Image (cartoon, helix red, strand yellow):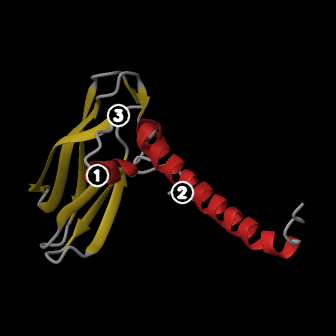
């Protein structure tokens, strides 16, 4: 009968197996996180509205609150120049959604450098499926080079 190999010769094989199992577990965790981020994107976007642009950049539709018909124009009101930003908040989800109570407009210059921002309320607390709510926000005495660069919902506490 052949004696079993010494214990030292079995250790490298066990260490290699443990390393492989660790890598496989890491890959499985990363895949699970990626799958969850795609599968639950609606819920993520509802809790974190800024993620809408991330999902849009990936070409993944997110149904929920969206800005549509965005326009900006300079107007004269009471002899003062005012930048007016208007649009519509739309709920394209299949359920009623709460509307974040702060909308932020970020202005940039010609080189896309942010130099001003302001916030305003949307004027509605919730939107039913398919419902839309118009909004208009004004900034007095905007810089001549101001252009609205971004408009997005702000999560409470930001």
Considering the numbered disc 3 on the image, is that residue within a helix, a strand or a loop? loop
Q: Nearer the viewer, residue 3 or 91?
A: 3
Labelled pair 1, 2 in contact (Cβ < 8 Å): no
Rounded to the nearest whole Å, what is the CA distance between mark 1 and mark 2?
Answer: 21 Å
Q: Earlier in the sequence, mark 1 or mark 2?
A: 2
Dot 2 alpha-carbon crowd within 10 angstroms: few under 14, some 14 to 19, many 20 or more: few
Considering the numbered disc 1 on the image, is that residue within a helix, a strand or a loop? loop
Rounded to the nearest whole Å, what is the CA distance between mark 2 and mark 3?
Answer: 31 Å
The residue tagged 1 is 58
Image point 60% across, 62% down: which residue?
A: 23
Rounded to the nearest whole Å, what is the CA distance between mark 1 and mark 3?
Answer: 17 Å
Labelled pair 2, 3 in contact (Cβ < 8 Å): no
Reply above or below: 94 against 3. Answer: above
> Is 7 left, or right, of 117 in this rendering?
right
Reply above or below: 55 against 64. Answer: below
The residue tagged 2 is 27
The residue tagged 3 is 64
Dot 3 alpha-carbon crowd within 10 angstroms: few under 14, some 14 to 19, many 20 or more: many
Residue 77, quarter of the rendered image: bottom left
Q: How many marks?
A: 3
> Is 145 left, or right, of 138 in this rendering?
left
Residue 11 screen position, x and y as percent: 79, 71
């Amino acid at each position: 009968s052949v004696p079993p190999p010494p214990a030292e010769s079995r250790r490298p094989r066990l260490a290699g197996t443990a390393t492989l199992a660790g890598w496989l577990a890491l890959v499985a965790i990363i895949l699970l996180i990626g799958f969850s981020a795609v599968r639950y994107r609606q819920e993520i976007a509802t809790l974190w509205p800024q993620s809408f642009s991330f999902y849009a950049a990936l070409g993944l539709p997110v149904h929920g609150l969206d800005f549509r018909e965005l326009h900006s124009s300079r107007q004269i009101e009471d002899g003062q120049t005012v930048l007016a930003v208007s649009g519509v908040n739309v709920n394209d989800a299949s359920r009623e959604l709460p509307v974040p109570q702060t909308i932020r407009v970020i202005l940039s210059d010609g080189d896309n450098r942010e130099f001003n921002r302001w916030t305003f309320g949307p004027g509605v607390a919730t939107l039913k499926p398919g419902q839309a709510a118009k909004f208009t926000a004004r900034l007095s005495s905007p810089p001549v080079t101001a252009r609205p660069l971004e408009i997005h919902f702000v999560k409470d506490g930001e």
